[in-house]
Amino acid sequence: MDTVKNNLLSVIIPSYNEQDMIATTFHTVKNILKEADIPFEILFVDDGSKDMTYIQIAALSKEYPEAKGISFSRNFGKEAAIFAGLESAQGACCVIMDCDLQHPPATIVEMYRLWEQGYEVVEGVKSSRGKESRFHAFCAGSFYGIISKVIGIDMANASDFKLLDRQAVDALLLMPERTPFFRALSSWIGFKTATVNFEVQERTVGTSKWSFFSLVKYAVKNITSFSGAPMQFVSLMGWVTLIFSLIFGIQSLYKYFSGAALEGFTTVILLQLIIGSVLMISLGIIGHYISRIYDEIKARPRYIINKRCGY
């Protein structure tokens, strides 16, 4: 990280295949911040895009001193892009927002004013989730319900759209995890916190880069990186199976001694299926955590920067 500049706001924008939105997003944010007389830099993080995203970023950086960009050698994911932006930002405070403008840029001004009042973390809280299917809303609600119970913080309407003071940024950058969960970690670190409500805007160009399977993968990765709760599920399933076995065993002995023995083949098959399923699920969960431990032990970098512009 370069020298921190007093009162400078760094707007960090992770971008993946957003060539049609780069210029629009930059000019929209720039005009709002200039009108509010807020000193700023806008840092785009190209997460290994396959289109002309970085070319658009580089063109802006040549024309506007506020525009900066870094590009990964390949796609490392949004969390890596956020942390790369935080490490490269020069501002006394940083805002993370999406490139598709679903996070309303006008809210940044409100966040900055709260920061000037002494708040070190300003959380953007969704007052509505925009247009999405009931199934997607149910899945998102279930995921954040689990995370909220694990960390003891209500994340039902949390988002990556937030402002962090330099002290909070430095606290995040001290964490050595290879696969950090920014949305939860930025709440877990504490500090003096305020919230602002915003409505998720409709995307005007392009489509979401998140498929159902990528969202499921994202959820599993972040739950297991932040919590050991799924490991407790293994123990719970073991106790449930034990209780079921005791009940079934008592029933079988009762029928045996009363002269009404159970038919053996069906009983054995059912028991094998139940116990086998529990064992395979348990081994899968344990195996996933071992895989995560393996990734952490290798200690590979979170990302590799291939290009920079505007510095």
Image: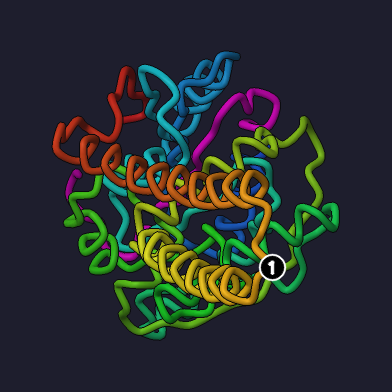
The residue nearer to you, when weighing 98 against 9, is: 98
Relative image position of residue 242 (x, y in whole percent): 44, 68
Q: Quadrant of residue 32?
A: bottom right
Relative image position of residue 149 (x, y in whole percent): 48, 77
What quarter of the picture does the C terminus occupy?
top left
Determine if the magenta segment contains residue 19. yes
What quarter of the picture does the N terminus occupy?
top left
Q: Which residues are magenta?
A: 1-23
Under mark 1, the amino acid is Ala
Left or right: residue 166 versus residue 21 is left
Eyeballing the image, is 242 above or below 25?
Answer: below
Residue hosting label 1: 260
Q: Quadrant of residue 115?
A: bottom left
Relative image position of residue 165 (x, y in whole percent): 32, 68
Relative image position of residue 245 (x, y in whole percent): 50, 66
User: Residue at left 79%, top 33%?
Assistant: 205
Left or right: residue 244 versus residue 259 is left
